[in-house]
Image (cartoon, grey):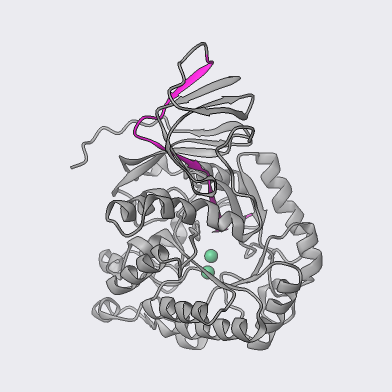
Amino acid sequence: MDTILIKGGHIIDPENNINDEFDIIVDKGKIVKVEKDITPFAYSKVIDASNCIISPSFTDLHVHFRDPGQTYKEDIKTGSMAAVAGGFTTVVCMPNTIPAIDEPSLVRYVIEKGEEVGLCRVLPAAAVTKGRRGKQLTEMALLKDAGAVYFTDDGAPVVDSHIMRKAMEYAASLGTFVANHCEDLSLSKDGVAHEGEISAALGLPPLPPEAEETMVARDCILSIRTGAPVHICHISTKLAVEVVAWAKAMGANITAEVTPHHLYLCDDEWLDFHCKAKVSPPLREYEDIEAVRWGLSSKIIDYVATDHAPHAHHEKMLDHWNCPPGMIGLQFALPIVMELVRKDYITMKRAIEALSTEPAKKIGLKPPSIVEGEKAEFVIFNPNEPWEVTEDKILSKSKNTPLLGRKLRGKVKYTFFNGKIVYEDTSKEEFCYD
Ligand SMILES: [Zn+2]
Ligand SMILES: [Zn+2]
């Protein structure tokens, strides 16, 4: 399969200001021609991309591949398979594995295993504190040298403000940043569902939104005072978005991400009494969803990150106290963001920036380019094609998502990485979407 012709697609490449219909020829992994109306002639493969968008492939700065230590939930191979099926060719794995990624040898383990699988670029974030215990900083310079792209204790917040401040300053001096899972544990306590009408009606232990908001505010202040960058993981409430907007207006070096589930699902997912809805931070109310959508379109929120968090079936079947929080997300980011485009919350260009170019730039990567001379690294997707979420289509080892059985629109057809096709959609849907 040496020469591939891709016909009839609409290229959107924000970094190169391309937003038009072009055909593409990929030869031996390289983009050799981007032109209108190329005549099909003796190519080893012709891809019909009519009704499809072709964009730089996506980057997800927040996934949990559970490798090492909990590979019954996911591993770097199955995580990579889910990633490319979702259009992602760069992912950053969280360090809350067993053991935690707090030593250079573990950073290298993730990178080397990712390279061995070879489907996409698998990069590690390293822990801020040893063992993610919140007490003692890791050897950040050594971890950075080994290949860690940023620092986080995700799964848990950096509670101690002094340690957070020091970590932010060290990370800044190394040219990188700390990302925080903002949650004041003295406020969230044993809460499992967003504190509101639904938690009250169902008698679920409430988790107040200020558990997130107060720590977002603290980190904003630390960033303003020190000048060091800080990144807010999975922002989810209206007030948290407003706090970030304020900090950005103050000139703070702050960025924020939002997950597909916080853009799409609210706390009424708990109504079927199923812990599939349990996630941290919890699913919020409708006005919070509206706020994060607005935040994404106005760039108060910089990009989308899935917080792909696989858990085994038997774990998600536990009661709401004992079931671990989290849901998978790599294959749902595109359809959910396309829903926002269809409903006019964001433009297609902004959607592609938020899924692809903005997160790549955040970790200092040159975003993939759809121009002649570059290696093929792009995704071909139909923004409107319907599909039903079924277990067999989920390539992750775990199937924990409240979206099972739902119909979504927006489907990845092909993903190219390192000059090769690493994912091709072969499924056919038999239902009509109306
Ligand atoms: Zn988190
Ligand atoms: Zn996470």
Residue at screen point 54% across, 57% down: 358
The number of numbered discs placed on residues in the rendered structure image is 0
In percent of width and height, residue 213 lies at 45, 82
**Does the rendering let one see residue 93?**
no
Does residue 229 show up? yes
Residue 60 counted in the magenta span: yes
Viewer-side residue, 4 vs 14: 14
64 sits left or right of 86 in the view: right
Q: Residue furthest left?
A: 434
Identify the residue at horizontal 80%, vertical 68% (top origin).
Answer: 141
- The image quadrant that residue 29 belongs to is top right
- In the displayed structure, would residue 370 be above or below residue 405? above
Extreme residue toward the top, this view: 42
Q: Which residues are magenta?
A: 43-68
Of 383 and 161, which appears nearest the observer?
383
Residue 304 horizontal/vertical position (percent): 47, 59
Q: In this rendering, is residue 284 above or below 40?
A: below
**In what quadrant of the picture does the C terminus appear?**
top left
Q: Residue 421 appears in which quarter of the rendering?
A: top right
Q: Nearer the viewer, residue 202 or 10?
A: 10
Q: Quadrant of the N terminus?
A: top right
Question: Looking at the image, is 248 positioned above or below residue 330?
Answer: below
Q: Position of residue 236 (x, y in %)?
A: 41, 72
**Magenta run includes residue 31:** no
Percent position (x, y) of residue 206? 36, 82
- Taking the spot 60% from the left edge, 32% from the top edge, the residue there is 372
Q: Nearer the viewer, residue 151 or 337?
A: 337
